[in-house]
């Protein structure tokens, strides 16, 4: 008998089909359990984490037995009676959902997005557009629409919606190359209305209007963007959007479809951005060409001046390779002086620009800074959002307030910076590595930092007695192979004494320590070891929570598949 064909759908309300027929998953906790396992398909999810997520940190005494019942019911639903295929496995310390390729609509969407990216890079916008439209057709509404108010789903929903928007932007970019400007205008009008601070969409709308003979409307679109961004954030549009405006004013031939000398780079809309006037921040003149401004960013977020030096020091380093715009943001209480905060940030921006780094700054009044900066990070194509780990966080290790909001809802990577001084030149980036998912996230960011700083990457494993050393060294060897294949970065292993003491001793010989934040941060805060290291390290410490980072820093899916294969957990 052939194994049942399963089809799981989370790009909309949760649905499950077996051999073409919808399977009834009706119990609320059972549906939530399946959604959690689908979001982490192929990964072992611990019982403790599942209990905390299903009962939102307040489980009843019967939670463990109730979880076993829900797992058993799911198995009956998903697995055929003759046992020809195991789908939901019990693997200490929890459970793992093993799916075949293509059984989850999200994995199909990601595969199509990767195919479209390759086609665009090969100069085939027609095929890229068709594949992207096929990918977008998989969406039946907002991701996990029936779990909008569930705590466990909020972060995932934000990430998936961001990925959908990125796919839409890339599809429009391909269609613009194909000359479909006029028919794109209604679609872009709707997207800009839904995402008014998304500069890339504004730029695409301006280009579509201009190519459709509507130059005045294209310029009005820029003025509307400037007004909205000034009112909402107190920030000017970025250089790419300003450059498009200047090109429209100049009727620059490079904006026309297929100009003779247009460079073959499908991901770039602006061919010849104008150089800014040194006397006016953000103004442009058509006198000389300017190197292309980065279209993604590293954002530095603070509510006070405290810690901004440490954020700028690390942020500038990370924004070098690959090139990223640096955005400094301060949220100011409504009763504080906004002009003073804006002026202070402007002086920092001038110093950063003088060092050759592209930077913008924004200060705004806010009664909910965490939520506001998450929205801003999404609108500004942010790959990494850096926040300062202030003395209250380092004193208690508890994650509360704006930091908690950002960690729960941001779709990009989030880093908490604890400053033990400035980055030392020539010393390696250190990453403790024990094999957990959040530690792989730290390896990725550590590799990015090492490449940007031009220094070695060092992976730290815990030494012990008997076979522990062998196990740790094998894991570090696996991790080194993964970073070479997935990230193009060599990593050297180092065994250290278990606990914070060994990490601190090793870190004293490094320039930066990157640590992954456990998925249990809502229950455990920083965790005892991370708390001690962040508090006592003599070098800067970056505590990382993984984000989706679409189109961002590293080929994450390649790394993930490779590490699963190495560890023998591919199913």
Image (spheres, rainbow, N blue to C red):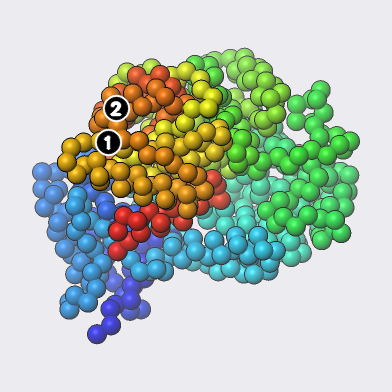
Check if mark 2's residue and mark 1's residue have beta carbons within 8 Å: yes
- First-in-chain label (2 vs 1): 1
With respect to residue 108, does 452 lie above or below?
above
Residue 402 position within the rendered picture, expressed as x and y whole percent measured from the top left: 42, 29
> Nearest the camera: 512 or 454?
454
Residue 349 position within the rendered picture, expressed as x and y whole percent measured from the top left: 66, 23
Image quarter in which the C terminus is found: bottom left
User: Could you tell me which residue is drawn at 65 percent across and 43 percent down?
Assistant: 295
Query: SS at mark 1?
Result: strand
With respect to residue 153, does 80 lie above or below?
below
Image quarter in which the N terminus is found: bottom left
What is the number of the mark on residue 55?
Answer: none
The residue to which callout 1 is attached is: 462
> Nearest the camera: 255 or 365?
255
On the picture, is 49 further left or further right than 246? left
Q: Quadrant of residue 536?
A: top left
Camera sees residue 333 = no
User: Could you tell me which residue is drawn at 66 percent across and 49 percent down?
Assistant: 201
On the picture, is 157 further left or further right than 203? left
On the picture, is 397 further left or further right than 264? left
Query: SS at mark 2?
Result: helix
Mark 1 surroundings: few (<14), some (14-19) or many (≥20) residues within 10 A? many
Residue 359 position within the rendered picture, expressed as x and y whole percent measured from the top left: 66, 30
Mark 2–mark 1 Cα distance, whole angstroms, equals 8 Å
The residue to which callout 2 is attached is: 502
Residue 269 position within the rendered picture, expressed as x and y whole percent measured from the top left: 73, 51
User: Could you tell me which residue is drawn at 14 percent across and 53 percent down?
Assistant: 66
Mark 2 surroundings: few (<14), some (14-19) or many (≥20) residues within 10 A? some
On the picture, is 557 further left or further right than 398? right
Camera sees residue 257 = yes
> Nearest the camera: 375 or 19?
19
């Amino acid at each position: 008998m052939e194994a049942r064909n399963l089809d799981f759908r989370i790009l909309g309300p949760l649905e499950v089909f077996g051999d073409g027929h919808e399977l009834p998953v009706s119990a609320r906790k059972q549906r939530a359990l399946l959604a959690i396992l689908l979001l982490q398909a192929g990964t072992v999810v611990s019982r403790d984490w599942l209990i905390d997520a299903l009962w939102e940190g307040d489980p009843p005494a019967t939670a463990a037995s109730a979880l076993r019942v829900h797992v058993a019911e799911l198995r009956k639903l998903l697995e055929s009676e003759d046992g020809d295929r195991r789908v939901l496995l019990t693997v200490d310390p929890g459970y793992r959902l093993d799916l075949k390729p293509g059984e989850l609509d999200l994995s199909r969407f990601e595969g199509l997005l990767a195919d479209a990216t390759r086609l665009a890079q090969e100069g085939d916008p027609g095929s890229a557009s068709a594949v992207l439209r096929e990918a977008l057709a998989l969406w039946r509404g907002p991701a996990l629409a029936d779990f909008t108010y569930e705590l466990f789903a909020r972060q995932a929903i934000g990430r998936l919606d961001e990925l959908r928007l990125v796919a839409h932007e890339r599809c429009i970019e391909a269609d613009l190359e194909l000359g479909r400007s006029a028919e794109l205008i209604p679609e872009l009008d709707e997207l800009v209305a839904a995402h008014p601070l998304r500069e890339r969409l504004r730029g695409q709308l301006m280009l579509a209007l201009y190519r459709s003979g509507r130059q005045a409307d294209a310029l009005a679109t820029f003025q509307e963007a400037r007004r909205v961004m000034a009112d909402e954030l107190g920030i000017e549009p970025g250089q790419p959007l300003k450059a498009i405006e200047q090109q429209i004013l100049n009727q620059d031939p490079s904006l026309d479809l297929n100009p003779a000398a247009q460079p073959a780079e499908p991901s770039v809309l602006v061919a010849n951005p104008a150089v800014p006037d040194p006397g006016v921040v953000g103004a442009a003149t058509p006198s000389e060409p300017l190197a292309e401004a980065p279209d993604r960013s590293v954002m530095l977020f603070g509510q006070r001046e405290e810690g901004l030096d440490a954020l700028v020091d690390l942020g500038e380093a990370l924004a070098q390779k690959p090139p990223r715009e640096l955005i400094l943001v301060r949220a100011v209480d409504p009763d504080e002086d906004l002009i003073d905060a804006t002026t202070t940030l402007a002086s920092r921006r001038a110093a950063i620009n003088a060092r050759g780094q592209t930077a913008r700054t924004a200060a705004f009044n806010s009664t909910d800074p965490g939520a506001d900066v998450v929205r801003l990070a999404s609108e500004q194509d942010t790959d990494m959002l850096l926040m300062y780990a202030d003395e209250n966080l380092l004193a208690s290790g508890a994650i509360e307030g704006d930091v908690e909001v950002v960690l729960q809802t941001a779709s990009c990577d989030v880093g908490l910076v604890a400053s033990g001084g400035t980055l030392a030149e020539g010393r390696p980036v250190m990453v403790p590595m024990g094999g957990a998912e959040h530690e792989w996230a730290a390896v990725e960011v550590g590799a990015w930092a090492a490449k940007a700083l031009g220094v070695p990457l060092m992976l730290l494993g815990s030494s012990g007695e008997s076979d522990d050393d062998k196990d740790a060294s094998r894991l570090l060897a696996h991790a080194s192979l993964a970073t070479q294949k997935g990230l193009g970065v060599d990593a050297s292993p180092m065994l250290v004494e278990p606990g914070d003491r060994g990490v601190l001793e090793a870190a004293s010989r490094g320039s930066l320590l990157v640590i992954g934040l456990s998925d249990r941060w809502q229950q455990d805060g920083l965790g005892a070891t991370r708390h001690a290291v962040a508090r006592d390290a003599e070098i800067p410490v970056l505590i990382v929570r993984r984000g989706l980072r679409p189109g961002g820093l590293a080929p994450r899916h390649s790394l993930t598949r490779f590490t699963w294969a190495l560890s023998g957990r591919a199913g």
